[in-house]
Image: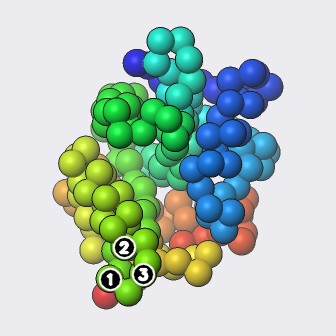
């Protein structure tokens, strides 16, 4: 398995588009073309996850100072639950040594019909070396828990990143809070 830069105009990007469509609900999904277009300062890594020369998933990572914001991570439906996600996250951490990788996942909520899925996602990230930060965000009518690859979340750096993000994606900016 390996991670490779995913060119915007490639056959593999078309496969990643299909994976994006199947993996994310419409309210949480941005088209890959929109993500590429938002990268005016070359601060976006679009990475294909490859197994046996075939793209099986992708990462979208926004780069800002020492923060690597894992905005999107998807594996093809037919390849899920096979260990690919675990291996891919380990490769991602190796790709950005010394950086703090930050991601968000739907916060567990026993009143939500998909709480078991939310718990599985949380547990997946925790098994793969992410730490809960105690911080949350709310957007797209959903509460998200924030996790990162360090025990000490660099909240100030992440807020600086979200301020930068608001200048390029003004309608999708997390506001941090603790419960």
Q: Looking at the rendered structure, which numbered label has been put on residue 110?
A: 1
Disc 2 packing (10 Å; few <14; some 14–19; many ≥20): some
Q: Are marks 3 and 1 in contact (CB under 8 Å)?
A: yes
The CA distance from mark 3 to mark 1 is 6 Å
What residue appears at the point 65 percent right and 35 percent down from the top-left corner? 16
Residue 112: mark in rendering: 3
Q: Is residue 158 visible?
A: yes
Residue 30, relative to residue 84: is it above or below? below
Crowd tier of the residue under label 3, counting other residues whose Cα lies within 10 Å: few below 14, some 14–19, many 20 or above: few
> Which residue is found at the position 53% from the left and 28% from the top?
56
Residue 115, label in figure: 2
Q: Is the C-beta separation of discs 3 and 2 under 8 Å?
A: yes
At label 1, counting other C-alpha atoms closer than 10 Å, the crowd grade (few under 14, some 14-19, many 20 or more) is few
Q: CA distance from mark 3 to mark 2?
A: 5 Å
179 vs 45: above or below: below
The spot of residue 94 in percent (x, y) is 33, 29
Helix, strand or loop for disc 2: helix
User: Which residue is rendered at x = 58% and y = 81% of the image?
Assistant: 141
Q: Position of residue 33 (x, y in %)?
A: 78, 43
**Measured Cα–Cα span from mark 1 to mark 2:** 6 Å
Q: Quadrant of the N terminus?
A: top left
For label 3, the SS is loop
Circle 1/circle 2 CB separation < 8 Å: yes
Residue 50 vs 92, above or below: the answer is: above
């Amino acid at each position: 398995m390996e991670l490779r830069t995913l060119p915007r105009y490639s056959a593999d990007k078309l496969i990643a588009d299909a994976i994006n469509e199947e993996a994310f609900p419409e309210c949480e999904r941005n088209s890959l073309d929109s993500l590429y277009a938002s990268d005016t300062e070359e601060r976006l890594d679009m990475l294909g996850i490859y197994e046996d020369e075939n793209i099986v998933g992708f990462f979208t990572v926004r780069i800002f100072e020492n923060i690597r914001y894992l905005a999107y991570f998807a594996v093809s439906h037919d390849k899920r639950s096979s260990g690919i996600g675990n291996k891919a996250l380990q490769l991602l951490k190796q790709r950005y040594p010394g950086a703090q990788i930050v991601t968000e996942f739907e916060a567990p909520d026993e009143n939500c019909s998909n709480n078991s899925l939310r718990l599985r996602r949380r547990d997946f990230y925790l098994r793969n070396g992410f730490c809960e930060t105690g911080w949350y965000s709310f957007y797209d009518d959903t509460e998200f828990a924030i996790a990162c690859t360090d025990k000490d979340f660099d909240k100030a750096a992440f807020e600086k990143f979200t301020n930068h993000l608001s200048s390029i994606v003004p309608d999708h900016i997390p506001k941090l809070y603790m419960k």
